[in-house]
Image (spheres, rainbow, N blue to C red):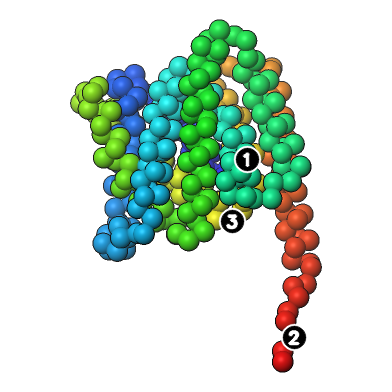
Amino acid sequence: MLIGGFCAVMMNVLIRFAAYRLHPFEVTFFRCLFSLFVMLPFIIRAGPSILATPKVGFYTLRAVVGLISMLSWFYGITIVPLVNFTAPLFATMAAALILHEDVRLRRWIAVVIGFVGVLVIMRPGRESLDAMLLLILLSAASSAMNNITVKYLVRTERPNTIVALFSVYLTPLSLIPALFVWEWPDLKSLGALVGLGVIGTLAHLSVARAYLAADASACAPYEFVRLPYAALIGYLLFGEVSDGWTWVGAAIIAGAAIYVAHREARLARIGRAVPVARPAVR
């Protein structure tokens, strides 16, 4: 999840760079297209059977949700840098309601504390943020639902298959809105788009493997760690100096994520220590 979060922040950088020249809807299409190219060797090696999945309907639904998430994220990031950092709260609620995970009180507390850290950084009430509230919520909710579908699929599907089929389904879908704003990219923009596809694929693979290893509600607080990443990258690449409140919020977020990591590791040790009862041999 930490690798996936770092990749997501680097995607934000490339999105902002590419969006200087191209519409965010077109950037979304090229991200999907180059991600498909990255996964093509795996698709060829797996053969046509990879497309003959019994979950065609679910993959199609996931592609639609993923498209909404990407379009709102890619468009929103050019206006509100923190556009989808409320997603962990939605993901935890969805994990409890849809996946029926046992989300204990301490996980809820950690997620809420992380969300408080986001509020400290964003400081709601500023007009520039209030005007984009609906876009923030749409991006966060659709991003959370997208992650929940990953957690559902890893129960039966390999992470590489999930990422590959996501690109297969999403690339033609994302072309539709891109055609309405189409403009051929120049070489600099094309380089950013290629990087976006590669890093986006790595982020997707990282998150899929994280959800294979742990509950969605346990992974959710780590999404908040993107904020300190974003502050550091903004300073190093764009000279954006974060104020004191940003670092206070980042410390709150990091504390919540570290607490969940410690708690989950402790529960895992306890689980290994408890012997599993075996049926008597008759």
Q: Nearer the viewer, mark 3 or mark 2?
A: 2
Sort mark 1 into few (<14), some (14-19) or many (20+) by Cα contacts within 10 Å.
Answer: many
Q: Residue furthest top?
A: 127
Looking at the picture, does residue 142 appear above or below residue 274?
A: above
Q: Residue at 30% across / 35% down in the picture?
A: 174
Q: Which numbered disc, 1 or 2, marks the residue that appears first in the sequence? A: 1
Residue 188 sits in quarter:
top left
Residue 213 disc label:
3
The residue drawn where x is 72% and y is 89% is 281
Q: Earlier in the sequence, mark 3 or mark 2?
A: 3
Q: Position of residue 64 (x, y in %)?
A: 37, 38
Mark 3 and mark 1: span between their CA atoms?
16 Å
First in residue order: circle 3 vs circle 1? 1
* Percent position of residue 250, x then y: 67, 28
Q: Residue at x 64, y 25 (%)?
A: 118
Residue 225 in the image: above or below residue 207: above
Taking the image as drawn, is residue 63 in sight? yes
Q: Horizontally, is 172 left or right of 117 in the view?
A: left
Amino acid type indicated by mark 2:
Ala
Residue 115 position in % (x across, y down): 66, 29
Between the C-alphas of marks 3 and 2, the distance is 31 Å
Q: Quadrant of the N terminus?
A: top right
The x, y position of residue 255, in whole percent, is 73, 35
Q: Nearer the viewer, residue 26 or 229?
A: 26
Quadrant of the image for the C terminus? bottom right
**Given the image, on which type of amino acid does mark 3 rest?**
Ala
Q: Amino acid at mark 1?
A: Thr
Residue denoted by label 1: 92
The residue under the point 72% across, 54% down is 265
Numbered circle sitting on residue 280: 2
Horizontal relation, residue 157 to residue 119: left or right: left
- Vertical relation: 26 (above or below) 162: above
